[in-house]
Amino acid sequence: MRSARSTRPPENSAWSRDLEGEPIWVGYLADRIIAATRTRLVALSLDKGLVEWQYDLGTDRKAGIDPFAKEPLVEPGRDAAPPLLKDFRIVGNRIFCLRGEQALLAFDGDTGQLDWSYSPSSGRINPHLLVGQRRIVLQVLKPNVIQVLNTVDGSRRAEFPQAEEEGWPRDPLAIDDDHVALVADRLTVSLFDTTRGSTPGCSARPRSCPATAPLACSAMPSGYWCSTTART
């Protein structure tokens, strides 16, 4: 395994680091810059750019990762080659990302070790998901299932099979401890109960919404606001 290499910094830069791959995401966590390529996740010290930890695809065991962490599964019919890292986000002291459409990974921000991973037994993970401080809400497609996971350890809190519907076009929006707003399709928004798996009388379609206009939702003091991105 090769480590990210220090390089001569550009003019007026304190330091630079060669990630040996195209940087696709950069975040900040506890005085560290977290940088990612499609095959590597690296924590760099803020002052000198030193590599504090590094994760490379295919080296879980060598890097001392928890041997009891669930291995991502390969869905029958899919390419067995390792899927690439994507859709990074920082919540609390963890870095979350997807490994292709097959697994959600949670890394410890201090050590870079894989705290846990979640892989559906079949189907693929919709990249539009919610990662909160206490819960994760995601959609598995074909077969369609809404999964609610514990953010701390990845354990299942609830599972709700769904009809063969469209994949969510936007990330769920947290409303309170038990509810999220879902853009169920390009025209419908609904309030979903993550403890009961129901949307009792809480779906809506904007009356003036054009047939092809996608919806966007934002939190507001009095509730949540949904609008289209169509131009008039």
Image (cartoon, helix red, strand yellow):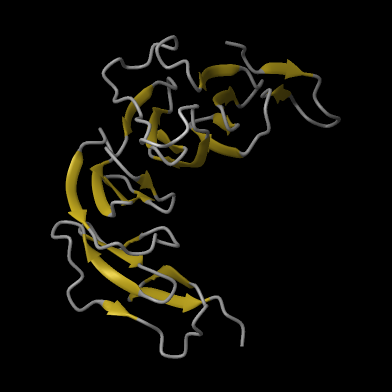
- Which quarter of the rendered picture does the N terminus lie within? top right
- Which quarter of the rendered picture does the C terminus lie within? bottom right
Q: Position of residue 170 (x, y in %)?
A: 44, 61
Looking at the image, residue 183 lies above or below residue 133: below
The residue lying toward the viewer, choosing from 116 and 166, is 166
In the rendered image, which quarter is residue 124 located in? top left
Residue at the outermost right position:
11
Residue at the outermost front position:
77
**Image point (47%, 15%), residue name:** 59
The residue lying toward the viewer, choosing from 34 and 126, is 126
Looking at the image, residue 187 lies above or below residue 118: below
Q: Position of residue 137 (x, y in %)?
A: 30, 51
Looking at the image, residue 105 lies above or below residue 209: above
Q: Position of residue 17 (x, y in %)?
A: 70, 23
Q: Position of residue 52 (x, y in %)?
A: 54, 17
**Image point (83%, 32%), residue name:** 12
Residue at the outermost left position:
196
Number of numbered discs present? 0
In the rendered image, which quarter is residue 150 located in? top left
**Image point (55%, 31%), residue name:** 34
Looking at the image, residue 6 lies above or below residue 137: above
